[in-house]
Amino acid sequence: MEEIQIPGLVSLLIGLQFASFGWRIHREITVGDLGEKTWFPILDKLNLASMFITFLACILLPLVTGEFGQISRAVLGSALLLLILHPVNMLGHYELLTESGRLKYSRKIGEKKGIAFEELIYFPRQEAISVGISLLLAVTVGYFVYATS
């Protein structure tokens, strides 16, 4: 069995986290330039926190200790899972996980009425559920990786 190339995996993970973060920031800047309100969703805060923790545990800690130990492996496993689930959390943010999620907004658009920013929910229920499940799974994966490595 081939050994996993951890440095390459860490580099890929952080690169994808940066790309996802950059895409979201670009989107918010574009929306802001159109005069719309902007915000920094919870799912993006989670991605940013994961990126920072990944840097600390998977790059800085191994540089200091000279090894990629249990903590680094656990964080890598959790961060990879959070990255994989990021698109699902984004679907939750836009309330696209159920058929009726965006219906309240699409009705207004169909009636040629704009959607007031105040009507948009910062942390919609779908996002709260998907982020909660993602965090629970990430902690579970991290614990499993830590316990078995």
Image: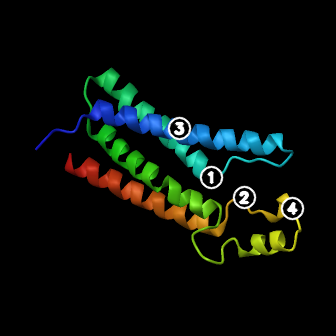
Q: Which mark is residue 136?
A: none
Residue 95: x percent and y percent? 64, 67
Specify which label sits upstream in the sequence, 1 or 2. Answer: 1
Disc 1 designates what residue? 42
Q: Nearer the viewer, mark 4 or mark 1?
A: 4
User: Splitting the image into 4 quarters, where does residue 110 fall?
Assistant: bottom right
Check disc 1 and give the amino acid type.
Ile
Secondary structure of the residue carrying tag 4 is: loop
Residue at 10% over, 44% down: 1
User: Splitting the image into 4 quarters, where does residue 106 fall?
Assistant: bottom right
Q: Which mark is residue 122?
A: 2
From the image, which quarter does the C terminus lie in? Answer: top left
Q: Nearer the viewer, mark 4 or mark 2?
A: 4
Q: Give the crowd class for mark 4: few <14, some 14-19, many >=20 residues within 10 Å.
A: few
Q: Give the crowd class for mark 3: few <14, some 14-19, many >=20 residues within 10 Å.
A: few
Specify which label sits upstream in the sequence, 4 or 2. Answer: 4
- Real-space Cα separation, disc 2 to disc 3, in angstroms: 23 Å
- Real-space Cα separation, disc 3 to disc 4, in angstroms: 30 Å
- Real-space Cα separation, disc 4 to disc 2, in angstroms: 13 Å
Q: Nearer the viewer, residue 44 or 115?
A: 115
Check disc 3 and give the amino acid type.
Ala
Residue at 33% over, 55% down: 141
Secondary structure of the residue carrying tag 3 is: helix
Specify which label sits upstream in the sequence, 3 or 4. Answer: 3
64 above or below 13?
above
**Contact check, label 1 and label 2, Cβ < 8 Å:** yes
Disc 4 designates what residue? 116
- Real-space Cα separation, disc 1 to disc 2, in angstroms: 8 Å
Specify which label sits upstream in the sequence, 1 or 3. Answer: 3
Residue at 43% over, 31% down: 56
Secondary structure of the residue carrying tag 1 is: helix
